[in-house]
Image: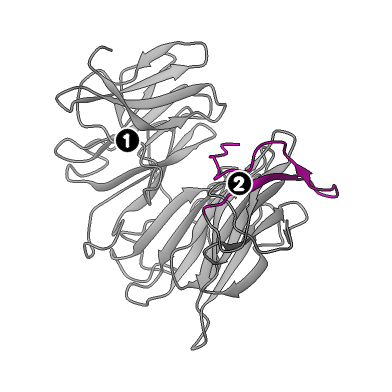
Amino acid sequence: APGETALSETVMSGNGRVLAVVVEDATGGRNIVTVASDGTVTRATTTTEDYDTPSLDAPIGPLLALSEDGGTIAWRRTVIVKELFTRRLVTADPAEQVTRDGQFTDTIDNVGVVGFTGGRLVFAAGEVTGEPDKPIGGADIYMVDMTGPTAGQPMNLTQTSGETTAPFLVHGDLEIFEALLDPRGERLLLRIDPVTGGGDEGLYSVSLRDPGTFTEELPQLADTATLHGAGDSVLVIADMEAGPGPLTHGLWLLPPEDDPSGIVELGTTTADVTFDRFTATRRGNRAALVATLAPGLSVALEIDTVARTLGVVWPHASALPSRLAYSPSGMLTLGLGAPGAPDGPFVWVGFSPGLAPVLYPVPAGNGFPLDG
């Protein structure tokens, strides 16, 4: 609309056909708009208020999400108190307040949209009961069916603000640092401190098939764990703390819930090595990332998520650009620069398993973003 500006962060439906964006007018008032692939524009909100942008990096984010088919949207409003709303776009039903009084107190805090899965919405809501540096504090993670006979009735998946049995041993004071759904939407993954003040984080999974069933995937995480979806699996990058020895930086692959093999260690190294620049093929059967020893001294690693193996793409430590990308056919593309020259220039090379590297006929340069 005239006078409105689309804010930069957007979210897309699982089928890739609907995009949602927050727009802001000259006075700071916001609305949420969706755009479909056929050009249809829908104003999801009917009143101008303070709606959160997607905030994709928020621990309990995103704070704005679309269902897989793009027909339902969930968002957080922050006027006076935080509240979570959903709306069916295809039928133009009025918005429904998920965190409505009677089910949640009118001072609810720590509200976030974790995501949609199979017609269900997973979200966080709870009181702040711990210290200010606790990202979620006493919040619980809930699931609500959007379509079935119990539609609109939230189910508490974690009971972290009231559970006193293992792994939640301290009533109302559990630290949850991150919550997200696995790629298949079968599990809720939580990075938590199971005993407040214990100092050891852990990665736990909660089955959405059998809510209340907790599995400890990785204990004794020493610092922030980074989680990436790859096909049906989740790649975990984390520092491990094992006794008085030095920290270990490692990669693990968490397979689908119905896989009995459990989490697989792909490789470990010293904590001064960093892993970043993650990317994956569209099928998710292969993923790549960069291991950096020092500025301008890096190697590209590739993961076969089916065989669960880790290999080196190019055996020589080099300067690598800020992005890697897979082509639609599955060729990994990256730039190779002289060691110790993190700003390039780079030559651009494509790699495919079992084939010789392909040098792209583009001039050597200082790089450009590859969006895949």
The picture places residue 321, in percent across and down from the top left corner, at 56, 50
Q: In this rendering, is residue 232 above or below 160?
A: above
Q: Nearer the viewer, mark 1 or mark 2?
A: 2
The picture places residue 37, in percent across and down from the top left corner, at 52, 16
Give the residue at mark 2.
324
Q: In this rendering, is residue 350 above or below 166?
A: above
Helix, strand or loop at label 1? It is: loop
Instruction: Specify whether 59 is left or right of 14.
Output: left
Residue at figure coordinates x 38%, y 52% from the top left:
59
Q: Which residues are magenta?
A: 343-372
Q: Is residue 257 visible?
A: no
Give residue 100's quadrant in the image. top left
Q: Tag 2: residue type?
A: Leu
Q: Is residue 145 visible?
A: yes
> What secondary structure predominates along the stretch shown in magenta?
loop
The picture places residue 367, in percent across and down from the top left corner, at 55, 43
Helix, strand or loop at label 2? It is: loop
- The N terminus appears in which quarter of the rendering? top left
Q: Nearer the viewer, residue 89 or 338?
A: 338
Instruction: Specify whether 54 is left or right of 248.
Output: left
The picture places residue 302, in percent across and down from the top left corner, at 70, 55
Instruction: Specify whether 220 is left or right of 47.
Output: right
Give the residue at mark 1.
53
Q: Nearer the viewer, residue 179 or 144?
A: 179
Any magenta on residue 311? no
Q: Confirm or deny contact between disc 1 and disc 2 (CB under 8 A).
A: no
Q: Nearer the viewer, residue 171 or 350?
A: 350
Count of labels in the image: 2
Q: Nearer the viewer, residue 143 or 51?
A: 51
Question: Quick one: label 1 or label 2, which is nearer the N terminus?
Answer: 1
Q: Tag 1: residue type?
A: Thr
Q: In this rendering, is residue 81 above or below 307?
A: above
